[in-house]
């Protein structure tokens, strides 16, 4: 079993090295890891960190490292999509280059997939925290409150539009069999990709199973790249648009019909 771990890195000089070392050191029974690092010409030392890391592990054959260097930062979605194209694993997991989540949660995330219970898992921060206040920025309590409230609104809107009852649709930990995304069309460049990926997997008939994961939010002063005004607008658009946007790369009227009936089944269940 091979696990492809896609790590988008842009200006993460403070955390990239620690994160990469943690992912590399993690041992998972019967699983070989393929780290796919996508770096977009950072203005800090992130590119050097990624290059040194990839060079250090270039000779490794069980766990492997692929480094994709992009010329400019076009957003997390753009970077993760490049990673998806390069992935060769059976299962794909998306990982940020910060330390907000714990790599120790990987085992719990891939377990239901390896046991054949599902093809798609979401790591829910709310299930573990037991409440909705998952963001706590010490120096900006108002921003924390706005983002926590915004989280509820976006999660609710997503659940209504897609007929779901997910506790954490915007979690970074989206883990799925690679076959699930083959042939699906993705266009979102920024954090709107999160919604597009989830929407299209659900529309393709893959109902996500949520498992609890730990989360410790970082503040904007620590490098968070979400924009408080710009990004939420793209999320609303993504939630509504991708309910109906082209699902597959080669959609014909026939495959569209199949997609629609699969989506209907998954929203019924
Ligand atoms: N390669 C690349 N990575 C990016 C770009 N924009 C953001 N990232 C990376 O994407 C990851 C997520 O960015 P964060 O600022 O942590 O975003 P977040 O608010 O935690 O959002 P989520 O990941 O959706 O939970 C980080 O590892 C960033 O370095 C980009 O343009 N290029
Ligand atoms: Mg993050």
Image (cartoon, grey):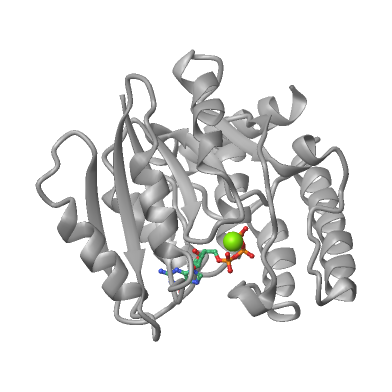
Q: Is residue 115 above or below residue 74?
A: above
Q: Quick check: 52 left or right of 41?
A: left
Q: Residue at x 70, y 65 (%)?
A: 235
In front of the other: 53 or 230:
53
Q: Quadrant of residue 80?
A: bottom left
Q: Residue at x 49, y 14 (%)?
A: 116
Q: How many marks?
A: 0
Q: Quick check: 65 left or right of 131?
A: left
Q: Residue at x 42, y 47 (%)?
A: 22
Q: Quick check: 169 left or right of 251?
A: right
Q: Is residue 84 visible?
A: yes
- Residue 174 position within the rendered picture, expressed as x and y whole percent measured from the top left: 55, 42
Quarter of the figure that contains the N terminus: top left
- Residue 255 position within the rendered picture, expressed as x and y whole percent measured from the top left: 47, 37
In front of the other: 83 or 242:
83
Q: Is residue 163 visible?
A: no
Q: Residue at x 81, y 70 (%)?
A: 138
- Residue 220 position within the rendered picture, expressed as x and y whole percent measured from the top left: 67, 76
Quarter of the figure that contains the C terminus: top right
In front of the other: 225 or 47:
47
Q: Of all residues shown, which one is farthest toward the bottom?
A: 43
């Amino acid at each position: 079993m091979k696990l492809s771990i896609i790590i988008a890195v842009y200006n993460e000089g403070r955390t990239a090295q620690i994160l990469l070392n943690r992912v590399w050191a993690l041992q998972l029974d019967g699983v070989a890891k393929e780290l796919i690092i996508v770096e977009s010409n950072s203005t800090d030392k992130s590119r050097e960190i990624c290059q040194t890391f990839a060079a250090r592990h270039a000779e490794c054959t069980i766990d492997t490292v692929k480094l994709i260097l992009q010329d400019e930062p076009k957003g997390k979605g753009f970077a993760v999509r490049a990673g998806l194209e390069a992935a060769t694993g059976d299962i794909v997991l998306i990982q940020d280059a910060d330390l907000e989540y714990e790599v120790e949660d990987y085992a719990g995330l891939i377990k239901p997939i390896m046991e054949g219970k599902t093809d798609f898992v979401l790591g829910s921060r709310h299930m573990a925290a037991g409440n909705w206040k998952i963001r706590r920025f010490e120096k900006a309590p108002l921003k924390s409150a706005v983002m926590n409230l915004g989280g509820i609104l976006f999660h609710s809107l997503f659940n209504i539009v897609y007929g779901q009852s997910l506790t954490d649709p915007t979690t970074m930990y989206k883990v799925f069999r690679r076959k699930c995304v083959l042939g699906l069309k993705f266009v979102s460049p920024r954090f709107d990709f999160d919604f597009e990926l989830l929407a299209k997997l659900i529309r393709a008939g893959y109902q996500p199973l949520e498992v609890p994961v730990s989360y410790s939010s970082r503040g904007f002063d620590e490098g968070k790249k979400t924009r408080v005004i710009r990004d939420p607008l793209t999320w609303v658009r993504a939630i509504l648009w991708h309910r109906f946007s082209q699902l597959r790369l080669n959609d014909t009227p026939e495959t569209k019909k199949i997609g629609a009936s699969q989506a209907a089944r998954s929203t019924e269940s």
